[in-house]
Image (cartoon, rainbow, N blue to C red):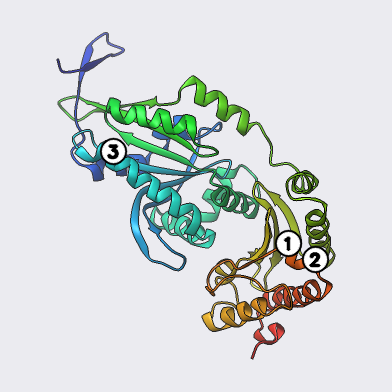
Amino acid sequence: MTSKVFIVGSDNQLLALQRTAYDSEDLFQRLLGDHPALLEQVAGPDGQLLLVERETPVPEELDGGGRWSLDHLFLDRSGVPVLVEVKRATDTRIRREVVAQMLDYAANGVAYWPIDQLVSAYKATAEAAGEDAEASLSEFLGGEEPDEFWRRVEANLRSGRIRLVFVADAIPKELRRIVEFLNEQMRPAEVLALEVEQHMTADGLRLLSPRLVGNTERAEGAKAVQSSDPIGTVEDWLARLEATRGSSVLATARRAHDWFLSAGFDVGRSRAGIWTAVSTQAGRRCYPFFLADRTLWADLYHLEAHAPFGSPQVRQQLLDKLRALPGAGFRGENAGGRPSVGWDKLQSEAGWGAFKEVALTVKRALETGDLEALQIS
């Protein structure tokens, strides 16, 4: 039997709307992009989403082009990336293949999406819609500082705190069970499905009815416990580091944290560790070094967007300097990657002293935009 819904008008007349398939997947996608409110049930506690881009390229390696294309990338108010894949019920790929697709997008997006690319994509999307990107973002954030929001987006990406959403006009039971299973098992990622039925009248009046699928009580309880756990302070992270890695690693990491502060870097906490930041000559924020559980790493990929590090040759020479630190050489071959050094290697005074010199030249170069400040010819 064909499904109908009915509307009773103010004149007490009954209007029947017939359940109708979407004419095309593109139409379905455009409806979601134009009206993010349809996704309110997967938008987090605030119920709002910011569209970053439709058909977002997903690379499979650093500096790589887009091997895949995600239907929609949104951000919620907490800076959680929301990956949306849209399929009509008539598409036979809606079962297992679409799940494999989404996991490809998630695994590679978390690893290889640079935050500057997402910022640029958002601005281009807003401008294409005739909006002022900064004003729209400010309205979305309700007064929060945009730089802090984008920092949180990046931290969520790197820690895997994302939300994967399958959207269809009908969710098959096979997909529903897969979504329920993944959502119960995955931490800190969420996996959800949204069924958006379409009903229409003969003259084209459309009624859209979203329904959340797959958020079982068990998954909801587990995620609620996790989401209520705050990121914590730097001291919380250092205490956990001592408990898991020992007092010698704690001493080395604390020395690094204290030195970055005294040297004029901004320092803050993410779920994955401690970030450092520098205000660049262009008035932007750059995050050159990161303190993680096992390593200190340099984000050459992020540096690429900031003068004077746009040149691959300059980043290669910086990588060579890091790799040549006495007793504390960084590991990594890619001048657009994230070379790292273990905390044990930074315990020596020679290695630590040499690293500080390199870090200070990076800071001066970012603040001036000048290659000479980097002492690289």
At horizontal 64% and vertical 72% (from top left) the residue drawn is 282
Kindly indicate the quadrant of the structure image that contains residue 368.
bottom right
Residue at image location 44% in from the left, 35% down from the top: 191
Q: Residue sitting at 75 percent across and 74 percent down?
A: 355
* Residue linked to disc 3: 96
**Is residue 171 in sight in this rendering?**
no
In the image, is 240 to the left or to the right of 4? right
Instruction: Write down the quadrant of residue 302 in the picture.
Output: bottom right
Question: How many neighbours does mark 1 have within 10 angstroms: few (below 14), some (14-19), or many (20 or more)?
Answer: many
User: From the image, which quarter does the C terminus lie in?
Assistant: bottom right
Residue placed most toward the observer, 341 or 15: 341
What residue is pinned by disc 2?
347
Q: Mark 1 points at which residue?
A: 343
- Within the image, what quadrant is residue 193 found in? top left
CA–CA distance in space, label 2 to label 3: 49 Å
> In the displayed structure, does residue 189 sit left or right of residue 35?
right
Callout 1 amino acid: Trp
Q: Report how far apart the C-alphas of labels 3 and 1 lie in the structure.
A: 42 Å
Q: Identify which residue is drawn at 83% across, 64% down.
A: 259
Secondary structure under tag 2 reads helix
Foreground: 169 or 4? 169
The amino acid pointed to by label 2 is Gln
Disc 3 or 1, which lies upstream in sequence? 3
Q: Compared to 147, does 47 lie above or below?
A: above
From this viewpoint, which residue is outermost toward the top? 12
The image position of residue 81, as x and y in percent, is: 50, 45
Q: Nearer the viewer, residue 361 or 1?
A: 361
Residue 306, x across and y down, in percent: 59, 72
Q: In this view, does 2 lie to the left or right of 11?
A: left
